[in-house]
Image (cartoon, rainbow, N blue to C red):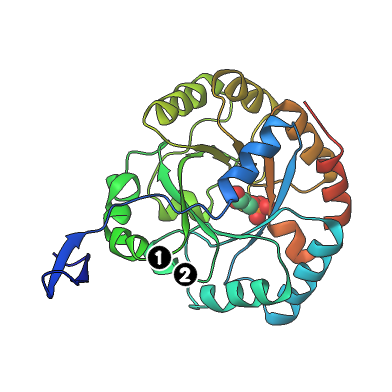
Amino acid sequence: MAFSAILFDKKTGKTVTFAKTVYMKDNGIYRRLCDAQQKNKKQLAILIDPDKVNSAQVAELVNNAVLAGVDFFFVGGSLVMNNQTENWVANIKAMSDIPVILFPGSVFQITHAADALFFLSLVSGRNPDLLIGQHVLAAPLLYQSNLEIMPTGYLLIDGGKPTTVSYISNSTPIPADKPQIAVCTAIAAQLLGMKIIYLDSGSGALHHVSVEMVKEVKQHVNLPLIVGGGIRTPEQAALLCQAGADLVVVGNVLEKSPSLVFELAKAVHFTTN
Ligand code: 1GP
């Protein structure tokens, strides 16, 4: 079979072929998420969309992130056109020890240079390609990689306008005022064995996920809860943490105001729920 390993058997002098066992590589990333969740220590991630940054911006974001104590970089996007993912991941890794997690919109964004990968199932949608199709295409790459693979139930929530992710994913976001749909979807994802719940209103959303929805999901699901999309101020980040987000993700606003990361990190790290 294509992914088997071939070993030399000293006793018989013959080569032996056997299938490797699929297992989840542990690079300590999921453990960090769970430890922080258990200790009620809120975390901050910066999302870098490879299409939207240049090397000077990446350098500034990474420098600021190190000084501010940012917990993770996420790298990826729903539509990436410039094939720079590997480059940016390598740059970030060269400049800091902050773990880099891939947040891939498609199989084309997989690079072995990162530490981990959100194996995203778009459970709020009904597009089979994003529930299982891309995953099958990614399987041979992931099988041979050292990335820590983190099965993630990804819920797209209406953020007040169509976003790249809602268009490209060809899926209907969960209405913002229907927390019960998000709750049932998150419970189903946990029962299916996913290890993380990610509530996202999409990059550049007008409105972030509501505090009420975050509270409701938190009450029903005990997995690490990530919230992103449309977060622009430290106050919003703090409110979402108080509501139950374990980790908040910020992208857009830092592309425009990279020094805001210091206030964001303070707001997140000094908040509990
Ligand atoms: C990551 O989509 C978010 O989950 C990022 O959103 O770019 O709006 O911060 P922003």
Q: Position of residue 150 (x, y in %)?
A: 47, 47
SS for callout 2: loop
Residue lying farthest front? Answer: 11
Pointer 2 residue: 112
**Observer-nearest residue: 171 or 7?**
7
Q: Is 179 located above or below residue 207 in the figure? A: above
Residue 119, disc: none
Name which residue type carries label 2: His
Disc 2 residue crowd, few under 14, some 14–19, many 20+, Cα 10 Å:
some
Disc 1 residue crowd, few under 14, some 14–19, many 20+, Cα 10 Å:
some
Q: Is 112 located above or below residue 127 in the figure? A: below
Q: Position of residue 237 (x, y in %)?
A: 77, 40
**Are the residues tagged 1 and 2 within 8 Å (C-beta)?**
yes
Name which residue type carries label 1: Ser
Image-based side of 43 in relation to 80, left or right: right
- Is residue 10 visible in this depiction of the protein? yes
What residue is rendered at 43% in x and 66% in y? Answer: 110
**Observer-nearest residue: 54 or 175?**
54
Q: Position of residue 177 (x, y in %)?
A: 58, 24
Q: Is 105 located above or below residue 235 in the figure? A: below
The quadrant the C terminus occupies is: top right
SS for callout 1: loop
What residue is rendered at 68% in x and 30% in y? Answer: 38
The answer for how far apart the CA atoms under marks 1 and 2 are is 6 Å
The quadrant the N terminus occupies is: bottom left
Image-based side of 39 in relation to 219, left or right: right
Pointer 1 residue: 145
Residue 242, quarter of the rendered image? top right
**Observer-nearest residue: 31 or 116?**
31
